[in-house]
Structure formats: C-alpha cells, structure tokens
Amino acid sequence: MTARRRIARLALASTLSLASLALTAAPASAHRFWLVPSATTLSGTGQTVSFDGAISNDLFNPDHVAMPLEILTIVKPDGSKGEMLNATKARHRSTFDVAIDQEGTWWIGVKREGYSGKFMLNGEEWRVGGRPRKGVKRVAGLDDIPAGATQVELVESLSTNGTFVTAGMPNDEAFAPSGKGLEIQPLTHPDELVSNEPGRFRFLIDGKPAAGVKVTAVPGSKQFRSSEMVTTVETDGEGIATIAWPTPGMYWIDAQAEDTNPAEPRAGKRRMGYTLTAEVVAP
Amino acid sequence: MPRLAIRTGAGVLAASTIAAAVPAHAETIRVTIPRIKVAEYHAPYVAAWLEPAAGGTARTVFVWYDVKKKGAEPGSKWLTDLRTWWRKGGRRLKLPADGVSGATRAPGTYDIPLPKGLPKGAYVLKVEAARETGGREIVSLPITVPGASGSTTGKTELGSVTIR
C-alpha cells in the first residue's frame, strides 16, 4: 500500500468510527470514547479542572481521533449549564478546562440520541443516518423519511458518556433520572470509589431498575501492563451492578442494554449505553 | 486565625528536642514525623481522625497543611492528597478550623490531646501523611476510650504514633 493510500484509509476509518459513534450506543469497533478529568475530587471551588477527550483503542491513551467538542455538555451541581474554557481539538485528543465555581458534583459529558436504519422507496433502498457515502441514497434522520417509504427498519440509539467532578461535599442532583433510556443511580458515588471496596451502581431503564444490564469496567494505562484487566458483571434483579476493582486507577465503566421499546413506532429496537470515567483511589 | 493543634505549650523546636522529657498527659497522641533525606523535601500534610469502631461519622483531631499559601493555588487545594481523610471527614470541615487545623510541621515529635468529652467506646485512630513529590502513608491504631493507649509505627512517611 502506498503511503498516500494508507493515509486515505486511516482518514476513512476515522470518519467511519465517528459516524458510527454518533449513531450507535456502542461502537462495534474496539474504539472507545472517553473523557478524563485532571482531578475528580477538589477541596473546594475556585479551581480549574482540565479534561481530555478522545476516541481511541487504548484507554486513556489518545491514539486514534479527538473527541468532537461541539457535542459536549457541562452540568453544574444545581443543574445549570457550565462553560467550556480553552477548548482545543488536536489530532488525537480534544482538551478543555472547566472553572469549578460551585460546590457539589458536576457532570461533564455527551448525551446522544438518534435513529439509524433503512427503508425502501420506489424499489430503491435508502439509508437513515450515518455518514454520506457515494452511491448510497440516504436521509439524515427520522424526520426526513418520505411519506411513501415502505419496509422501514429503524433502531433507536440513546447513549450517555461522561465523568463526574466533586468539589467539597458531593451531591446527587447529577443523578436525578430523566426517566428516558439507560441511566445510573450510584449506591457508591463515582467520586468515592476505593480499590478495596466494591463499587455499587444501580442502572435504570426509563427510570426503573434494569436487571441483566451488562457492565464492563476497564482501568486505563494498559500500555504499562500485559492484559486489559477487564471486569464484566451483570446487574441483579434490582438493577445493581457490583464491581470489584482489580487495581486503583482511572476506570472506564460502560453499561449496555437493548430492548424493543423505542419511542418511534416504526423502530423495532432500542440500543442504550451509559459510560462513565471514574477514579478508584488506593485505600 | 488557625490555631495550632499542638498543646504542649512548648515551641515546635522544643517539642521536637525535649519531647521525651515532657510527660504526656492522659490520652495524648504522640506523632513522629521522620526526617527523610531527599533532594526536594516538603513538610508533609498530616491529618488524624477517630472512627468509631462500630461505624459512624469520623471526627478529625487535627490537620496540618500549608495554611499560609493563598492565591490561585492555596495550600488548601492539596488537602485532597490526604485522600482517605478527605473522604472520611475532611470535606465536611470548613477550613481553617479552630483547634483542628494548623501549619505543616517539620520532622519531629508532636503531642496532640485527644478531643475532650469523647463518648466512651472503641475507636480507631487514623493518621495519614502525604508529602509533595513524596509518598503517602496511613496508619491505624485501635483504642478504647477512656484509658486509650497503644502504639504503632509507619514505614515511610510516618514514624511512631503512640497514645497514652
């Protein structure tokens, strides 16, 4: 392969994974979307936390593409919106600062929802969502599906990916469920995880405890060890996942669920994801 | 003004040099900060607290940090480096706190009285030290009040910790 073709292929791979990220809760590829704060626990306000965001193979080593910044949301402990400062999108990672001016628990992350799939129109197959591709007939979203469409097959995707920062005493406003999709209700606060105590989180689907949700926890810095050290658990009958930490560190914790209750009647399936980055300290 | 937790009445230097000669009063914690020979030495942040053995709220006995440093990065910024203390009770305090917080201490031996009026019962005394560009260490000493006594010792950032 010539260098130019290799670069073109890499560029294509990057765009593809971004596109699939925008549409599905769980990118089928190994690429993982993550956001890492420079500190999760602060002694008070008046401090600034820096964040890195990327889509990469290795957690939290930026080796693939930077996180898009325009989709980011910052929620203050009182529920109001915070501001992104000094934002930069570099080749492998994005970075920005948040001035922590309120005590309590902040959420910084990305919430996405959308539909993908296909339909037939006048004997031709059309795609819904995804990235524009040559020779593929496509509409951007649900609202663009023409009235004459037949054989509509859609999947609804809802995903949340973010991290928590606590200044002073933690509070729970950041975990008030919206009642839609997959959400978390921590029994152990994400900013209170210690490696010798298992972390316990209740997962909710549409505001109700969700049993059988698959949860994986992966510590970062894999480049300094030989195995991924992944922990996989499933939520119990009360929707509770209990995770024993193999080591202290920054963790990427990812929950995935699927059901047949999409909001849109023409969609058959719903995929849901909830991801958080959390620090597990040494005791 | 933050008041020093040390109550021996002696100055820091005096306390560190003649500590052995001064009889500790009843129920006094004696903490030794070891001298560590490194190129860049910063006095450690140290906190001590009592956890009721049966569970319940931890009570901070003292916390030593850089109380003087102000500005964009005040000394209080690094209190979370005492990560166990911070989680167990530090974050509930408004610092500086009278009779609890004080400046960092140089290597030496310090006497700190147990809080007055502690309810009778079993406790665990925890002492945690964290040093800039250095390490962190936490030691535990189970005690019974009244008549608390016992001793333990750290390996790196803390020397002996004694109650009698």
Image (cartoon, rainbow, N blue to C red):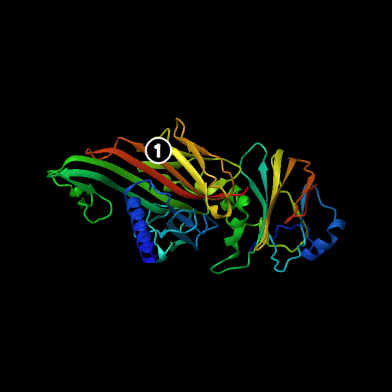
Seen as rendered, the residue at the extreme front is A1
Specify whether A2 is left or right of A266: right
Q: State left or right for residue A86 relative to residue B155.
A: left
Q: Is residue B146 left or right of residue A109?
A: right
Question: Is residue A85 among the parts visible in the rendering?
Answer: yes
Residue density around tag 1, few if under 14, some if 14–19, many if 20 or more, within 10 Å: many
Quadrant (top left/top right/bottom left/bottom right) for the N terminus of chain A: bottom left
Three-letter code for the amino acid on which mark 1 is drawn: Leu
The chain letter for the residue carrying disc 1 is: A
List x then y, in percent, for residue A52.
46, 60
Disc 1, SS: strand
> Is residue B88 placed above or below A3 in the rendered structure?
above
Q: Nearer the viewer, residue A282 or B48?
A: A282
Q: Is residue A121 above or below residue B77?
A: above
Q: Which residue is mark 1?
A: A204
Q: Residue at x 21, y 54 (%)?
A: A135
Regarding residue B117, the answer to whether it shows in the image is: no
Q: Position of residue A116 (x, y in %)?
A: 27, 46
* Residue at 29% from the left image edge and 38% from the top image edge: A269
| Numbered label tally | 1
Residue B147: x %, y % from top left: 79, 41
Q: Position of residue A36 (x, y in %)?
A: 48, 56
Q: Is residue A229 left or right of residue A176?
A: right
Between residue A132 and residue A37, name the one nearer to us. A132
Q: Residue furthest right?
A: B21
